[in-house]
Image (cartoon, rainbow, N blue to C red):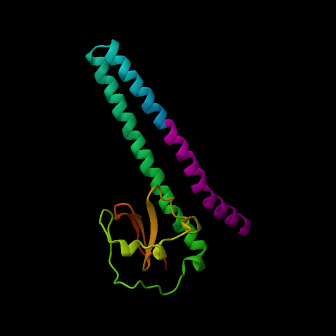
Amino acid sequence: MRKLITAVLLAATAFPAAASAQSAGELRRDQREIREEQRELRQARRYGDRGDVREQRRDVRDARQEYREDRRDYRQAGRDDWRGYRQQNRALYARGNWNAPFRYNSFRPGVRIGAPYYQQRFVISDPYRYRLPRPTGYQRWVRHYNDVLLIDTRRGYVVDVLRSFYL
Protein backbone atom coordinates (compact mmCIF):
# COMPACT_ATOMS: atom_id res chain seq x y z
CA MET A 1 0.00 0.00 0.00
CA ARG A 2 2.86 2.35 0.83
CA LYS A 3 4.41 1.80 -2.61
CA LEU A 4 1.11 2.62 -4.29
CA ILE A 5 0.76 5.89 -2.37
CA THR A 6 4.36 6.82 -3.17
CA ALA A 7 3.82 6.10 -6.86
CA VAL A 8 0.65 8.23 -6.92
CA LEU A 9 2.43 11.13 -5.22
CA LEU A 10 5.35 10.95 -7.66
CA ALA A 11 2.96 10.91 -10.61
CA ALA A 12 1.06 13.88 -9.18
CA THR A 13 4.22 15.97 -8.86
CA ALA A 14 5.43 15.03 -12.35
CA PHE A 15 2.11 15.81 -14.07
CA PRO A 16 2.22 19.65 -13.90
CA ALA A 17 5.62 19.69 -15.62
CA ALA A 18 4.31 17.54 -18.46
CA ALA A 19 1.17 19.68 -18.73
CA SER A 20 3.15 22.90 -18.99
CA ALA A 21 5.39 21.46 -21.69
CA GLN A 22 2.30 20.44 -23.61
CA SER A 23 0.90 23.96 -23.19
CA ALA A 24 4.04 25.54 -24.65
CA GLY A 25 3.57 23.36 -27.72
CA GLU A 26 -0.08 24.39 -27.88
CA LEU A 27 0.92 28.05 -27.82
CA ARG A 28 3.31 27.59 -30.75
CA ARG A 29 0.64 25.67 -32.65
CA ASP A 30 -1.91 28.43 -31.97
CA GLN A 31 0.50 31.09 -33.24
CA ARG A 32 1.06 29.07 -36.41
CA GLU A 33 -2.71 28.72 -36.84
CA ILE A 34 -3.16 32.50 -36.50
CA ARG A 35 -0.56 33.10 -39.22
CA GLU A 36 -2.31 30.62 -41.52
CA GLU A 37 -5.71 32.20 -40.90
CA GLN A 38 -4.29 35.67 -41.61
CA ARG A 39 -2.78 34.38 -44.85
CA GLU A 40 -6.15 32.95 -45.87
CA LEU A 41 -7.83 36.25 -44.99
CA ARG A 42 -5.43 38.13 -47.28
CA GLN A 43 -6.22 35.65 -50.05
CA ALA A 44 -9.96 36.08 -49.48
CA ARG A 45 -9.62 39.88 -49.63
CA ARG A 46 -7.68 39.61 -52.84
CA TYR A 47 -9.71 36.97 -54.68
CA GLY A 48 -12.88 36.21 -52.70
CA ASP A 49 -16.27 37.78 -52.17
CA ARG A 50 -17.68 39.44 -49.04
CA GLY A 51 -18.86 36.14 -47.56
CA ASP A 52 -15.36 34.66 -47.82
CA VAL A 53 -13.79 37.70 -46.16
CA ARG A 54 -16.33 37.66 -43.35
CA GLU A 55 -15.76 33.96 -42.73
CA GLN A 56 -11.98 34.36 -42.73
CA ARG A 57 -12.18 37.30 -40.30
CA ARG A 58 -14.24 35.13 -37.98
CA ASP A 59 -11.63 32.35 -38.25
CA VAL A 60 -8.80 34.78 -37.40
CA ARG A 61 -10.77 36.14 -34.45
CA ASP A 62 -11.44 32.62 -33.16
CA ALA A 63 -7.79 31.61 -33.54
CA ARG A 64 -6.64 34.69 -31.62
CA GLN A 65 -9.18 34.01 -28.86
CA GLU A 66 -7.99 30.42 -28.54
CA TYR A 67 -4.38 31.64 -28.36
CA ARG A 68 -5.27 34.13 -25.58
CA GLU A 69 -7.05 31.42 -23.59
CA ASP A 70 -4.17 28.96 -23.93
CA ARG A 71 -1.64 31.67 -22.98
CA ARG A 72 -3.70 32.56 -19.89
CA ASP A 73 -3.91 28.88 -18.89
CA TYR A 74 -0.16 28.44 -19.44
CA ARG A 75 0.65 31.46 -17.27
CA GLN A 76 -1.75 30.31 -14.56
CA ALA A 77 -0.14 26.86 -14.52
CA GLY A 78 3.30 28.49 -14.16
CA ARG A 79 2.02 30.78 -11.47
CA ASP A 80 0.57 27.92 -9.39
CA ASP A 81 3.67 25.75 -9.79
CA TRP A 82 5.32 27.20 -6.66
CA ARG A 83 2.45 26.21 -4.34
CA GLY A 84 3.10 22.48 -4.46
CA TYR A 85 6.83 23.03 -4.27
CA ARG A 86 6.36 25.18 -1.16
CA GLN A 87 4.42 22.39 0.55
CA GLN A 88 7.37 20.04 0.08
CA ASN A 89 10.09 22.58 0.91
CA ARG A 90 8.73 24.58 3.82
CA ALA A 91 12.20 25.47 5.13
CA LEU A 92 13.10 27.28 1.91
CA TYR A 93 10.09 29.59 2.22
CA ALA A 94 10.42 30.17 5.98
CA ARG A 95 12.66 33.21 5.96
CA GLY A 96 11.82 34.53 9.41
CA ASN A 97 10.59 37.97 10.32
CA TRP A 98 11.62 40.30 7.53
CA ASN A 99 10.62 43.94 7.59
CA ALA A 100 11.42 46.76 5.22
CA PRO A 101 12.28 50.27 6.43
CA PHE A 102 8.79 51.39 5.33
CA ARG A 103 5.27 50.39 6.32
CA TYR A 104 3.48 47.40 4.83
CA ASN A 105 1.12 48.22 1.95
CA SER A 106 -1.24 45.76 0.31
CA PHE A 107 -0.53 46.39 -3.36
CA ARG A 108 -2.76 45.38 -6.29
CA PRO A 109 -1.72 44.73 -9.87
CA GLY A 110 -1.77 47.90 -11.95
CA VAL A 111 -0.76 50.24 -9.12
CA ARG A 112 2.26 52.46 -9.60
CA ILE A 113 4.74 52.38 -6.73
CA GLY A 114 7.84 54.35 -5.85
CA ALA A 115 11.39 53.27 -6.62
CA PRO A 116 12.31 52.62 -2.94
CA TYR A 117 9.99 49.59 -2.98
CA TYR A 118 11.98 47.86 -5.71
CA GLN A 119 15.54 48.80 -4.82
CA GLN A 120 18.21 46.21 -5.56
CA ARG A 121 18.26 44.94 -1.98
CA PHE A 122 14.56 43.92 -2.20
CA VAL A 123 14.86 42.14 -5.57
CA ILE A 124 14.72 38.34 -5.48
CA SER A 125 17.91 37.52 -7.33
CA ASP A 126 17.05 33.86 -7.99
CA PRO A 127 13.29 33.50 -8.57
CA TYR A 128 13.78 30.01 -10.06
CA ARG A 129 14.80 28.77 -6.62
CA TYR A 130 11.25 29.48 -5.45
CA ARG A 131 9.63 28.21 -8.68
CA LEU A 132 8.38 31.66 -9.61
CA PRO A 133 7.52 32.35 -13.26
CA ARG A 134 10.34 33.92 -15.24
CA PRO A 135 10.16 37.72 -15.37
CA THR A 136 10.44 39.26 -18.82
CA GLY A 137 12.16 42.43 -19.95
CA TYR A 138 12.29 45.04 -17.23
CA GLN A 139 10.23 43.01 -14.76
CA ARG A 140 11.66 41.91 -11.42
CA TRP A 141 10.33 39.88 -8.49
CA VAL A 142 10.53 41.95 -5.29
CA ARG A 143 9.93 40.97 -1.68
CA HIS A 144 7.56 43.17 0.30
CA TYR A 145 7.24 41.73 3.81
CA ASN A 146 5.67 38.26 3.24
CA ASP A 147 4.34 39.16 -0.21
CA VAL A 148 6.13 38.90 -3.53
CA LEU A 149 5.50 41.54 -6.19
CA LEU A 150 6.32 41.40 -9.89
CA ILE A 151 7.33 44.95 -10.78
CA ASP A 152 7.87 46.60 -14.14
CA THR A 153 10.96 48.54 -13.06
CA ARG A 154 10.94 50.83 -16.10
CA ARG A 155 7.54 52.34 -15.26
CA GLY A 156 7.12 51.32 -11.61
CA TYR A 157 3.90 49.35 -12.07
CA VAL A 158 2.93 46.26 -10.09
CA VAL A 159 2.29 43.50 -12.61
CA ASP A 160 1.46 40.62 -10.26
CA VAL A 161 1.12 40.01 -6.51
CA LEU A 162 1.61 36.72 -4.65
CA ARG A 163 0.28 37.27 -1.14
CA SER A 164 1.64 35.41 1.90
CA PHE A 165 4.38 33.85 -0.18
CA TYR A 166 6.84 33.52 2.71
CA LEU A 167 5.03 31.71 5.50
Please provide percent x and percent y for residue 131. Answer: 55, 65
- Is 73 placed above or below 135 here? above
- Is 28 placed above or below 124 here? above
Please provide percent x and percent y for residue 106. Answer: 32, 75
- Give left or right: position of 31 versus 88: left
Residue in the foreground of this view, choosing between 79 and 159: 159
Quadrant assignment, res 119: bottom left
The outermost residue toward the right is: 3
Image point (32%, 78%), residue name: 105
Which image quadrant: the N terminus?
bottom right
**Helix, strand or loop for the magenta stretch, by majority:** helix
Report how many numbered discs are placed on residues in the image: 0
Quadrant assignment, res 163: bottom left
Residue in the foreground of this view, choosing between 119 and 127: 119
Image point (52%, 86%), residue name: 96
Quadrant assignment, res 102: bottom left
Please provide percent x and percent y for residue 46. Answer: 33, 15
Please provide percent x and percent y for residue 97. Answer: 48, 87
- Give left or right: position of 71 versus 114: right
The outermost residue toward the bottom is: 97
Q: Please say whether residue 15 is one of the residues in the magenta stretch.
A: yes
- Give left or right: position of 38 versus 129: left
- Is 67 placed above or below 140 here? above
- Is 21 placed above or below 37 here? below
Residue in the foreground of this view, choosing between 144 and 58: 144
The outermost residue toward the left is: 50
What is the span of residues highlighted in magenta in the rendered image? 1-29
- Give left or right: position of 46 versus 95: left
Q: Please say whether residue 114 is one of the residues in the magenta stretch.
A: no
